[in-house]
Image: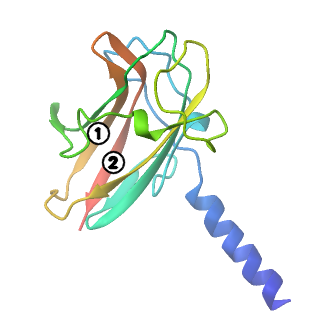
Amino acid sequence: MRNFTALLLIGAALLSLAQATDVKPCPKSKSRALTAEEVTISNCPKNKCILKRNSEASITMKLRPERDFTELNSDIQGIILDVPLPFPGYYGTSACPHIYDAAGEKKVGCPLKAGETYTYKNSFKILPVYPTVSLEIHWGLGDKQGDAACFQIPAKIKA
């Protein structure tokens, strides 16, 4: 009985980590709005991400571009008081190494074909130099012509 109870507790803990995250569309993006079922961020319950400094968070995002993309770059910013601040080490980097097939099992990289479903998987460090602040996280993947996917979510960085 103890083993069964332990398995239930572990299962519940894993399920809480794998919750979908409510996301908002990016105001200036023309990409299709993502749903809560298409984005999962660790430590992000439905309403707000709680990001602890000196830790790491992971993201999984389903995307289906509306046009072909030969290259895909990350546009990851923290928006504080309407001022966008790029996340160092992530903003402007290639997202291609983090692109998997629709099931999220096989790395496929770039290019991306219009109408095909892909999974983006990555992790990011919450650096100790980040201020403890409430902010909006802007997470876009695209090229100079526009986004393949983009969302925003409220977050709080804690000590």
What residue do we see at 48% from left, 32% from top? 109
Question: Relative to the observer, which residue lies in front, 17 or 141?
Answer: 141
Query: At numbered mark 1, what does the secondary structure look like: helix, strand or loop?
Result: strand
Type of amino acid under label 1: Glu
Give the farthest residue toward the right: 1
Instruction: Locate residue 45, reporting x and y percent.
Output: 50, 52
Position of the C terminus by quadrant: bottom left
What residue do we see at 55% from left, 40% from top? 107
Crowd class of label 1 (few under 14; some 14 to 19; many from 20; radius 10 Å)? many
Q: Residue 140: which quarter of the image? A: top left
Is 77 on the left or on the right of 95, as rendered? left
Query: At numbered mark 2, what does the secondary structure look like: helix, strand or loop?
Result: strand
Disc with the residue nearer the chain's start (2 vs 1): 1
Give the Cα distance between marks 2 and 1.
6 Å
- The way the protein has been coloured in the rendering is rainbow
On residue 136, the disc is 1
Is 18 on the left or on the right of 130, as rendered? right
Q: Is residue 22 visible?
A: yes
Type of amino acid under label 2: Ala
Q: Which residue is disc 2 drawn over?
A: 155
